[in-house]
Amino acid sequence: MILVAIFLVNAALSFALSLILASLLGPDGFGRYAIGLAVTLVINTVLFEWLRLSTTRFYSERVRTAEPAVRVTLNRAYLVTGAALAAVTAGVIAFGFDLGLPASLFAAASACGLAYGFCEYRMALARARFLERPYALLGLLRALFGFLFAAGAALATADPALVLAGAALSAFLPILVVRRRLHDAPPPDAGFRRDLALTFARYALPLVAASAFYQLLPLLNRTILAGREGFTEAGYFSLASELVTRLFQNLGAALDLVLFQLAVRAEELHGREAADAQVERNAGIVAAVVIPSAVGLWAVWPSFEALFIPAAFQGRLGETMRLMIPTLAAFALVQYALNPVFQLRRRTTPVVAAALAALLINVAIVFGWPALAGPQGFAAAQLAGMTGGLVILAAVAVATGGRLPWRDLALSCLAAAIMAACLWPTRGWAAPAWLLGPQIVAGAAIYGALALAFDVAGARGYLTARMRRMPDARRDPGSALS
């Protein structure tokens, strides 16, 4: 749970940084920065995500000592991939290929993708071995350096390319800090193994293809919107997308830090049946967190906007947010509740099919309806695509024998709906900025009470077990760590 707490602190800092950059760059500059950031995410996903996923799936404390070739193979693959990215970037700039971006913005996006890929690798190593301190240093220093370098560049220059360059530097420097803590000295006979690299590729490349399709959705939408209506409109769309993405991606990833490793451990110790049961429990927990978060954000949006959104963006995001919230909540459910059903089985083709369907639906709407109504129209296209991907993947999971937590899903929706009904009258109250704190507390209390009453995702059993452990922990403090 400490890893989750660390991640959530880092996520809050990252969320705050997005708001600061939007305020410093303005709608036009933030629109350009957001397109560059989308390129960064595509680069990171296509080139490095397969290795990060393989690290969390195949590396552990046991593997570190029993199979050192796994770490050697991962290290070599990262170095070769990073060198290839650097060479391609240099060639694109040297020969003047037109990618629709200024050369400086593309170079910065490429550097940022490289730095984030290598930083995420170190975080995956720490996560796989449950090393809390290196993970905390990597995440927190990256966020703090982001304020120093990315926000500093935005304040000093308002140049989106330099802001991305600052983000690249903020991801690279923490690697130097934890280098010794995560360093391995493998035995001389532990070299690069081609068969391991192929195993990693077979496992992860379908997941990477799916992630790349999903990452193309915001990149295409931002780019086409900027071409049709200018970078300012793309800036409004991008800020709404960034805020909701960071909220739900960070919530889902924080849970996935521990939940997926528990499923991997269950498979190692008790077999496939235990792993499937753990994946089902995990999906129920993810739904129990993501669904009320989505409904709650919609309910408190006027207060949130008044308190946090930069003045240049206020009044321009509400309609888009209403569509982006369910869109990215659906993506979080796909990524962290449904994808693990196929990951543990190493049958990831359905994940790719669902992602491709989401992309095609989005593209068909965007190009089939040329007169989309600004950011709202593109948000509607993205919602249609993501909903299609979610429905397809859930249907395939059920058809292939996957166990989904239908009871927890239904009860989470019911509890969230009751919470929204209770919060709804507060949306029209005066001075909404000062209501955000009480709204969050009230919403959390209402949903929490209902979750315990309904025993959503085993909440009541978990709380009872924790309360039973408390007397033992007071008598024997060491038992609290078990």
Image (cartoon, rainbow, N blue to C red):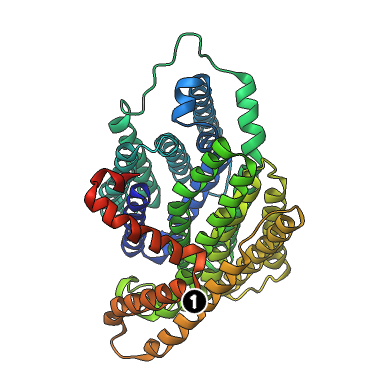
Where does residue 295 sit, x and y in percent of width and height? 48, 75
Q: Whole-percent x and y of residue 341?
A: 63, 50
Residue farthest top in this picture: 188
**Measuring 29% from the left and 40% from the top, which residue is drawn there?**
137
268 versus 28 height, above or below: above
Residue tagged by mark 1?
Answer: 416
Name the residue: 39% across, 17% down: 185
Residue found 40% across the figure and 90% down from its top: 425
Residue 313 in picture, x, y percent from top left: 39, 72
Whether residue 279 is visible:
yes
Amino acid type of disc 1?
A: Ala
Up/down of 424 relative to 193, above or below: below
Could you tell me which residue is drawn at 63 percent across and 32 percent down?
Answer: 201
Q: Secondary structure at mark 1?
A: helix
Image quadrant assignment for residue 243: bottom left
Q: Quarter holding the C terminus?
A: top left
Which quarter of the picture shows residue 91?
top right
Question: Is residue 337 shown left or right of residue 126?
Answer: right
Relative to the observer, which residue lies in front, 300 or 478?
478
Q: Is residue 8 above or below residue 124?
A: below
Q: Residues within 10 Å of mark 1 (few under 14, many from 20)?
A: many
Asked if residue 94 lies left or right of residue 205, the reply is left
Question: In front here: 387 or 315?
Answer: 387
